[in-house]
Image (spheres, rainbow, N blue to C red):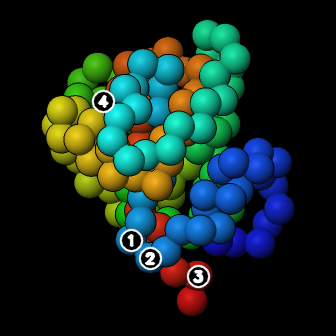
């Protein structure tokens, strides 16, 4: 966890504070199923609100990220969203691509899944927690 104090959502802040090295947090569009042991943190208010990118940017300000996982389908179906995500992550966070079905199974083991109002296909990411030292 970083100490930037940007994030106002108590639920997400608590999850980030509790995360250990290599644990995961999933951010998803409004259609991503939330199953398994993952806690549901539902931010969706209406279509597009909050957006995926603004949610990702805010979480990245608080969470030390070691690597990220995206669905490989984003490359062909939503390349503009992929570009925006990669821009947010920068060059220092490696990205792994997996089939969407694999992504959904992996998200079940996340500490939490944050549901946004995003309606862009495959606007989902698994963030793997790093250590700030």
Note whether 97 is above or below 92 in the view shown. Answer: above
Describe the element under mark 2 as helix, strand or loop: loop
**For residue 62, above or below residue 57:** below
Badge 3 vs badge 1, beta-carbon distance below 8 Å: no
Disc 2: which residue: 21
In the rendered structure, find residue 132 and report the number of the disc placed on it. Answer: 3
| Callout 4 crowding tier (Cα within 10 Å): few <14, some 14–19, many ≥20 | many
Q: CA distance from mark 1 to mark 4?
A: 23 Å
Residue mark closest to the camera, 4 vs 3: 3
Q: Which tag, 4 or 2, sits closer to the chain's start?
A: 2
Q: Which residue is mark 4?
A: 74
Q: Residue at x 49, y 74 (%)?
A: 20
Numbered badge on residue 22: 1
Q: From the viewer's perspective, tell me whether residue 65 is left or right of residue 33.
A: right
Badge 1 vs badge 2, beta-carbon distance below 8 Å: yes
Determine the CA span between mark 3 and mark 1.
12 Å
Look at the numbered discs 4 and 2 and tell me whether their residues touch, using CB distance below 8 Å.
no
For label 3, count other residues whose C-alpha is less than 10 Å away and answer few (under 14), some (14-19) or many (20+): few
Decide: is 96 above or below 27. Answer: below
x, y percent for residue 131: 52, 80
- Could you say which is closer to the camera, residue 110 or residue 79? 110
Q: Residue at x 18, y 40 (%)?
A: 102
Lower sequence index among marks 3 and 1: 1
Q: CA distance from mark 3 to mark 2?
A: 10 Å
Instruction: Compare marks 3 and 2 and give the one earlier in the sequence.
Output: 2
User: Mark 3 against mark 1, which lies toward the viewer?
Assistant: 1
Gap between marks 4 and 3, in whole Å? Answer: 29 Å
Q: Nearer the viewer, mark 3 or mark 2?
A: 2
Q: Position of residue 56 (x, y in %)?
A: 59, 44
- Choose top left, top right, bottom left or bottom right for residue 114: top right
> Gap in Å between the C-alphas at discs 1 and 2?
4 Å
Residue 87 visible in the displayed image = no
């Amino acid at each position: 966890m970083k100490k930037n104090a940007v994030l106002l959502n108590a639920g997400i802040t608590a999850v980030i504070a509790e995360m250990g090295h290599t644990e995961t947090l999933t951010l998803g569009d409004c259609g991503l199923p939330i199953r398994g042991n993952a806690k549901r943190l539902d931010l969706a208010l209406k279509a597009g609100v909050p957006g995926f990118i603004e949610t990702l940017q805010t979480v990245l300000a608080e969470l030390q990220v070691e690597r990220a996982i995206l669905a490989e389908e984003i490359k062909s179906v939503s390349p503009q969203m992929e570009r925006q995500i990669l821009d947010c992550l920068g060059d220092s966070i490696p990205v792994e691509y997996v089939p969407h079905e694999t992504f959904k199974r992996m998200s079940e083991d996340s500490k939490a899944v944050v549901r946004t109002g995003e309606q862009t296909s495959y606007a989902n990411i698994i963030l793997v927690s790093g250590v700030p030292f």
